[in-house]
């Protein structure tokens, strides 16, 4: 799904076929999965301040089409971003180095001038391997030193 190769509905059916005894629970979970994609309020509060300081803001997210559409529709903070890459649009997922190169190339970013936050260490390591400062995000406190706040 995150690679954009299957729709949410198609993936639901594949999961149900793999485990028919759990089909009802799988369908319920897949219907409610959108509810777990909640922005972190402390991070959202910091975005306007970073933008006001002249920092470029970009997203790099492994996500499926339907959740991407839902998030863009439900969250106005995306207007603060200068751009970004959703995995479903480019059919590449983190930690593939190609997705980091795609972001850098598309927006003419210099890796050494970028900081990448992610809550999954392998993604942080991948960013670091292409020259981006990778930081494991464990909460707003882990990011504050890099925000200059």
Image: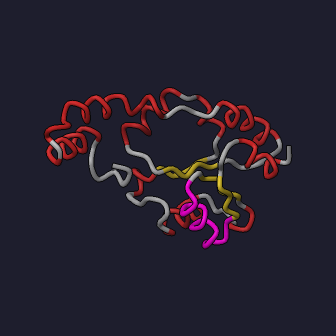
Q: Position of residue 144 (x, y in %)?
A: 79, 46
Q: Quadrant of residue 47?
A: top right
Q: Position of residue 147 (x, y in %)?
A: 80, 47
Q: Position of residue 69 (x, y in %)?
A: 42, 35
5 in relation to 27, above or below: below
103 in relation to 47, above or below: below
Viewer-closest of 89 and 115: 115
Q: Quadrant of residue 11?
A: top left
Q: Main secondary structure of the magenta part?
A: helix
Identify which residue is drawn at 55% across, 67% down: 101
Direction front: furthest residue? 21
Viewer-closest of 128 and 104: 128
Which image quadrant: the C terminus? top right
Identify which residue is drawn at 18% across, 41% down: 16
The total of numbered circles placed on residues is 0
Is 86 placed left or right of 39 in the picture? left
Indicate how the structure is coloured in the image.
secondary structure
Tell me, yes or no, whether the highlighted magenta stretch contains residue 127: yes
67 in relation to 109, above or below: above
Is 60 placed left or right of 42 in the picture? left
Give the residues in magenta. Answer: 120-132
Q: Position of residue 90 (x, y in %)?
A: 41, 57
Tell me, yes or no, whether the highlighted magenta stretch contains residue 123: yes
Identify which residue is drawn at 43% across, 31% down: 70
């Amino acid at each position: 799904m995150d690679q954009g190769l299957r729709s949410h509905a198609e993936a639901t059916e594949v999961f149900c076929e793999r485990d028919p005894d759990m089909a009802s629970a799988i369908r319920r979970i897949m219907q409610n999965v959108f509810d777990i994609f909640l922005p972190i309020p402390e991070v959202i509060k910091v975005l306007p301040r970073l933008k006001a300081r002249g920092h470029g803001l970009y997203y790099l997210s492994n996500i499926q089409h339907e959740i991407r559409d839902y998030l863009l529709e439900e969250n106005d903070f995306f207007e603060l971003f200068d751009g970004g890459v959703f995995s479903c649009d480019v059919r590449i997922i983190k930690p593939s180095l190609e997705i980091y190169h795609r972001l850098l190339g598309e927006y003419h970013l210099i890796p050494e001038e970028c900081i990448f936050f992610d809550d999954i260490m392998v993604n942080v390591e991948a960013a670091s391997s292409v020259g981006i400062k990778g930081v494991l995000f464990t909460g707003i406190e882990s990011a504050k030193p890099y925000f200059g706040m």
